[in-house]
């Protein structure tokens, strides 16, 4: 009996010892238990595995290859002069030194209204004759008026001749033949140079769109019918949209080349501020979140108030009622700050 008791006592001690080791091992490895031991015959949970998202990977490689191809073509076939100088219908550069157009830095459109055609967005050019000129026209005049028989005909025709193709030298040629051959434009309108291109000199007076202090013009067709200057505006918008987009892109690129180191400094500062903000969230999460909420509400409130004050200030001012669609795309973004619609849009966005 004593022997049986000693066996039971030893068995109990061994059980307690095993339980203690198990608890110790569990506390060492955590609640998930002991890890599996290395098994050289283990081949993974799935034997027949394959790559995923192969199609997306192929599309990504194709896109990267396309970027490389475009870059190579632009580098080898591109002409940087096309960024600096406008070109006429014959591909000649306006204002380029050492050429016949050296003294003609501006590009003139025979019929700016044709630039309102959808072909502008498809072909990236206006479907009208374009020539290089020394200056932009400064008056309303048609070729029929310039070639009419009166005491100013010779002077007006010589003025008109500088806006015709260089081959036009026969001033005695009849007006219908000249216009049929496309040697001269049917009309001239007051224009101003914009990025070396002659575009209608558009003015806004008391909310009325005018070109050269006039709201109508003669299109030179001989019918005597007056047309609204808004037709000139539509043509100028389409002719200007691609030009303005390219100008903005060039300005952005120039800014990058000049201020690249400031951009890097700004990125480093933003990285440091972000890390500090993350560290503060670790210890002051509640306070930081409430401070951010209050600051956002205050900033939005001030923004709404400022937009309303600017909107109220522009009420009744000449030209402030022009819509963003009528104004079109402008490289000088400060122009939009003089429109009521701009501040109204800002105020609505902040309220939302």
Image: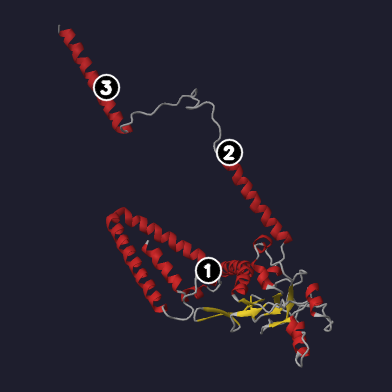
- Residue at position x 82%, y 79% from top? 168
Q: How is the image coloured?
A: secondary structure
| Image-based side of 346 in relation to 328, left or right | left
Q: Which residue is mark 2?
A: 54
Q: Which residue is mark 1?
A: 325
Residue 346, image x, y percentages: 42, 67
- Residue at position x 77%, y 84% from top? 147
Which secondary structure, mark 2?
A: helix
Q: Which residue is mark 3?
A: 18
Which secondary structure, mark 1?
A: helix
Depth check, front residue: 328 or 134: 328
Depth check, front residue: 116 or 345: 116
Kindly indicate the quadrant of the structure image that contains residue 115: bottom right
- Residue at position x 76%, y 71% from top? 92
Residue at the outermost top position? 1
Marks 2 and 3 sit apart, C-alpha to C-alpha, by 53 Å
Disc 2 crowd rating (10 Å Cα; few below 14, some 14-19, many 20+) is few
Q: Name the quarter where the C terminus is drawn.
A: bottom left
Q: How many marks?
A: 3
Which secondary structure, mark 3?
A: helix
Mark toward the viewer: 1 or 2: 1
49 up-or-down from 58: above or below: above
Q: Earlier in the sequence, mark 3 or mark 1?
A: 3
């Amino acid at each position: 009996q004593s022997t049986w008791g000693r066996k039971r006592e030893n068995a109990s001690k061994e059980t307690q010892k095993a339980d203690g080791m198990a608890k110790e091992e569990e506390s060492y490895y955590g609640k998930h238990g002991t890890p599996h031991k290395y098994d050289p015959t283990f081949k993974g949970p799935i034997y027949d595995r394959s790559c995923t998202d192969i199609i997306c990977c192929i599309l990504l490689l194709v896109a990267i290859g396309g970027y490389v191809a475009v870059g190579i073509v632009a580098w080898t076939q591109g002409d940087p002069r096309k960024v600096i100088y406008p070109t006429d219908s014959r591909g000649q550069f306006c204002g380029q030194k050492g050429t016949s157009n050296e003294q003609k830095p501006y590009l003139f459109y025979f019929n700016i209204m044709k630039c309102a055609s959808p072909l502008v967005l498809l072909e990236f050019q206006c479907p009208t004759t374009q020539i290089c000129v020394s200056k932009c026209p400064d008056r309303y005049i048609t070729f029929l008026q310039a070639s009419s028989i009166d005491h100013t005909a010779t002077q007006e025709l010589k003025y008109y001749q500088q806006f015709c193709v260089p081959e036009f030298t026969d001033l005695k040629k009849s007006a219908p033949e000249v216009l049929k051959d496309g040697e001269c434009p049917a009309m001239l309108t007051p224009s101003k140079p914009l990025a070396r291109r002659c575009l209608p000199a558009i003015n806004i007076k008391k909310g009325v769109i005018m070109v050269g202090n006039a709201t109508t013009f003669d299109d030179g067709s001989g019918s005597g019918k007056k047309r609204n200057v808004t037709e000139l505006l539509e043509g100028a918008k389409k002719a200007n949209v691609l030009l303005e987009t390219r100008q903005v892109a060039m300005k952005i690129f120039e800014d990058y080349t000049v201020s690249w180191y400031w951009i890097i400094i700004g990125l480093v500062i933003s990285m440091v501020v972000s890390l500090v903000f993350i560290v503060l969230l670790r210890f002051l999460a509640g306070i930081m979140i409430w401070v951010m909420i209050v600051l956002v509400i205050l900033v939005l409130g001030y923004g709404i108030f400022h937009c309303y004050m600017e909107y109220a200030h522009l009420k009744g001012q000449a030209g402030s009622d022009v819509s963003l669609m009528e104004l079109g795309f402008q490289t000088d973004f400060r122009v939009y700050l003089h429109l009521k619609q701009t501040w109204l849009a800002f105020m609505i966005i902040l309220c939302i």
